Amino acid sequence: MAMCSTFCPRLSFHLNCKSLSLFPVKHRFFVTIKAFSAQTSAPKADDLPASIGFLGLGIMGNPMAQNLIKAGCDVTVWNRTKSKCEPLISLGAKYKSSPEEVAASCDVTFAMLADPESAADVACGKYGAAKGMGPGKGYVDVSTVDGETSKLICEHIRATGAHFLEAPVSGSKKPAEDGQLIFLTAGDSVLYDKAAPLLDIMGKSRFYLGEVGNGAAMKLVVNMVMGSMMASFAEGLVLSEKVGLDPSVLVEVISQGAISAPMYAVKGPSMVKSSYPTAFPLKHQQKDLRLALGLAESVSQPIPIAAATNELYKVAKSHGLSDQDFSAVIEALKVKLQQ
Ligand SMILES: NC(=O)C1=CN([C@@H]2O[C@H](COP(=O)(O)OP(=O)(O)OC[C@H]3O[C@@H](n4cnc5c(N)ncnc54)[C@H](OP(=O)(O)O)[C@@H]3O)[C@@H](O)[C@H]2O)C=CC1
Ligand SMILES: O=CCCC(=O)O
């Protein structure tokens, strides 16, 4: 298995926060950051698992699997809608007709599915991946799901003697294409170590957060904040226009101050033009808010801003905006007032 020469050489820093006595035990974690250096090289072929499965080739799964193929990995793919496998097959991927067959033929299988229901079904269903797992194999679920779903999948996988890692990602379509995702992993550390070179092909950093459920929780908290930030930004754009300001100027003003964020700079200009090219589907953002509310409920934590934000995304869904980018939430605020 040869590594693709287009991949930049990279250096891995490993910051082991266990060594920092400032961190109380429950907050210790590991983070590894990918950086670039002329003195080091990309993961060696010998470091990589021999065969890799990829289940779920949507907006995220497709570029992630592509990066593995371009890095020289032996990749086998499956997707519910078979046509989405074709571009990957033409890049050299193998195809199997069920998650079970993919898992049976691969050392490590990744899954990038829409939601808890599809993630559980693909892993634990009739022809699910668990049926093809066994000792020595690994299942890495990179979908955004709740901790309970992740634990259920983990149980099914571990029952076969295989290892399980949850590894939801921060970063959207472009970071997925550029191999710049952030992995929020938890579960079997043996599999974390085995999958690390693959995570480094697809991402720029990886956090190991301990027990299954912690990766899911971290992801839901991050996306809860992101969903509220976007809703607040949308309110600002709509209000600025209503009071006679140019919303493009608001985007510029925000970009120069303390609340600047890459998300505002990337999404703002297209939102001003009422254009929402899909990178992160609005239905997935609402799913993440719903799951974050469940997480908060489980520990009796009030999250009133997220609760109100969730309602706004639900309104946006009712306007038929589910498959548009989540920045289309602004449309739910453009209410036509009766004169
Ligand atoms: N887009 C983004 O920016 C990011 C998304 N995520 C998360 O990653 C996951 C995937 O997101 P994304 O790629 O954008 O989503 P897409 O909607 O583009 O892809 C969803 C994938 O799930 C599959 N799927 C859906 N339902 C089922 C089912 N019942 N059985 C089998 N397969 C099913 C789809 O198959 P089919 O092609 O047949 O429909 C497709 O492969 C989600 O959990 C999302 O929250 C995380 C970070 C960023
Ligand atoms: O889950 C989607 C996250 C999108 C992002 O991190 O930009």
Image (cartoon, rainbow, N blue to C red):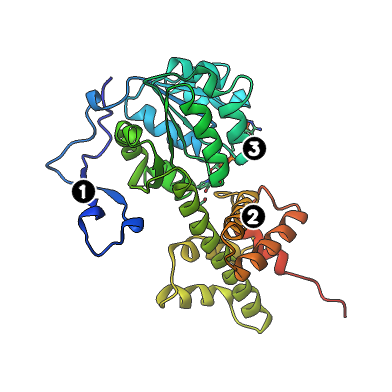
Amino acid at circle 3: Glu
Residue farthest toward the right in the current orientation of the protein: 339
Query: In this figure, which residue is indicated by the disc labeled 3?
Result: 117
Q: Earlier in the sequence, mark 3 or mark 1?
A: 1
Query: In this figure, which residue is indicated by the disc labeled 2?
Result: 290
Kindly tell me whether mark 3's CB lies below 8 Å from ligand 1: yes
Query: In this figure, which residue is indicated by the disc labeled 1?
Result: 13
- Looking at the picture, does residue 258 appear above or below residue 109? below
Could you classify mark 3 by the number of other residues whose Cα lies within 10 Å: few (under 14), some (14-19), or many (20 or more)?
few
Q: Relative to the observer, which residue lies in front, 73 or 163?
A: 163
Q: Secondary structure at mark 2?
A: helix
Name the residue located 57 percent from the left edge and 55 percent from the top edge. Answer: 295
* Residues at circles 2 and 3 in contact by the CB criterion of under 8 Å: no
- Looking at the picture, does residue 313 appear above or below residue 322? below
Q: Position of residue 269 (x, y in %)?
A: 54, 64
Could you classify mark 2 by the number of other residues whose Cα lies within 10 Å: few (under 14), some (14-19), or many (20 or more)?
some
